[in-house]
Amino acid sequence: MPKITYHHADGNQDVLDVPGGSTVMRSAVSNGVRGIVGECGGQAMCATCHVYVHTPYLDRLPEISEDEEEMLECAAAERDESRSRLGCRLTVGDELPEIEIDVPKAQV
Amino acid sequence: MTAMKPQAPSAPIADWVALDALHADPFPIYTRLRAEAPVAWVPAANRYLVTRYADVHTVDADQDTFSADESHSLMKRAMGHSMLRKDGPAHQRERKAAGVPLRPNQVKQRWTPIFRRNAEELINRLRPGGGAELVDEFAAPFAARNLAEIVGLPNASARDMRTWSQTMIDGTGNYANDPDVWARAERSYYEVDEALDEMIPHLRANPDGSMVSAMLHADDPLDIEEIRANVKMTIGGGLNEPRDVLGVAVHALLAEQRRRDRVMADQSLFASVFDESVRYVAPIGMYPRQTTREVELGGTLLPAGARLGVVVGSANRDERQFSDPDIFDINREKKPHVAFGGGAHYCLGAWAAKASVATVALPMLFDRLPHLRLDPDHPAQAAGWVFRGMTELPVVWDL
């Protein structure tokens, strides 16, 4: 099963084994991971599933679409030019069997 | 022998809840419902009311079980079958087409200058008077003018928009089946169609940034009936909300001098005022859902086909989610609220509302009306539960 690791600012982490096809946002919301809200349910409309992706995984991610780009500019926590993504746009599975992300200090 | 899965009990009946009491002040009723019966059958509302944050969140996240496509929907009769009462791909398709003008960059570049122009004109007209009822003379016409342009009906006056919005909303809430209410809603229904018939040939030939244009020119364009229904829903659902959050925000600032001083000293706090205002009094306080199967929610068992009232006005005051929820506090810990709903139907107008109220209207009102204050002789009033906001906000200022 694909694995997602959420690193929190206080040093704690949540590690989830999730079905292929799950997103970083949906997995967090349905498993009660703190700090990821997913207010709009994955439509790239609210910027409340902002995450910082650990560098080794960056080149395996899909391109940033126009919609995602726009929302990242509206995120509550500062955008990191290379590592910021929306969790609703990151899907784990055969292409991406595991990913580690940092949860930002604020989403709203 | 197979063990039977223990079944949750059916929802308790809250026959002590009365509609007039909800209309006057729903919050003490919500507090009691959250404590005693968080999913309750409320005979007066003819629905199960869902009042806790966690349960509202569950409903919003699962459109397969909690359908927006309510049967016998009064909204469909009053406004046509818009995306707000659809689920899944049918909803998504219409939302994708209509939502383009409401994305943050469009709001910033195209609409914010228009919001600014509309606010200027209205305030310039008010200024020499020294006093006004701010909902009727500013918040409502401001919201109406902005909405007419976003929708793509520049041929509609602010007065038309307000009449259409109110009469179609009244139809949506016409549980008493009052024929006069239906007659007024129906007149508006056809007037909106006429206004659209006037604009559509022009917008078909000359695309612009409006919603009607976006629906006409989408990769997967909407047909005329879809456009008509979505425009009516947007007129019904896009006017009260910025109007009411503006009224609540101005009242909160005028009612508490220290709060106002802090915001005047740091104008970036207008954004917090906006966010706390929609949490404190969600302009859309309740919306319907219908179960597609038997399901357990909040410790009770709901049958298939159960009609629910999702009470975001209560979820936003849930003490399990917010500390001191009945206090208006712009410094509270930032936590998600559900004033814009959540999930697939998350409010399309959220960015436009924030920009028009927090970026434009609030700073301009406090800047241009010297020593703005509540009118000591005429108390402000709030009302409503399905829709809630200030109904009277008399203010005065120095000339």
Image (cartoon, rainbow, N blue to C red):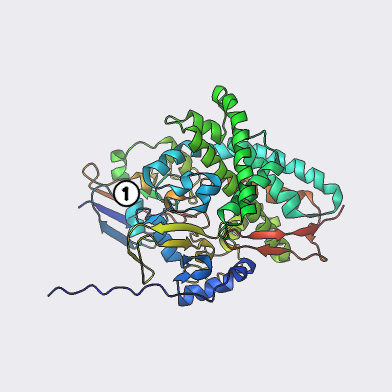
Question: Which residue shows up at 32% across the image and 38% down it?
Answer: A62
- Front in this rendered view, residue B273 or B206: B206
On the image, numbered disc 1 is attached to which residue? A23
Locate residue B155, reporting x and y percent: 67, 33
Q: In which quarter of the image is the N terminus of chain B?
A: bottom left
- Front in this rendered view, residue B136 or B334: B136
Tell which residue pokes out farthest to the front in this image: B179
What chain is tagged by disc 1? A
- Is B196 above or below relative to B298? above
Question: Which residue shows up at 52% across the image and 41% down it?
Answer: B229
Question: Which residue shows up at 60% across the image and 25% down it?
Answer: B202
Tell which residue pokes out farthest to the top in this image: B205
Q: Is residue B248 left or right of residue B62?
A: right
Tell which residue pokes out farthest to the left in this image: B1
- Is B373 above or below relative to A55? below
Asked if one can make out residue A58 in the rendered structure from this viewpoint, the answer is yes
Q: Is residue A51 left or right of residue B105?
A: left
Q: How many numbered tags mark residues here?
A: 1
Locate residue B165, reporting x and y percent: 63, 47
Q: In this view, does B336 lie to the left or right of B114?
A: left
> Type of residue at label 1?
Thr
| Corner quadrant of residue B284 | bottom right
Locate residue B16, reporting x and y percent: 54, 76
- Front in this rendered view, residue B307 or A44: B307
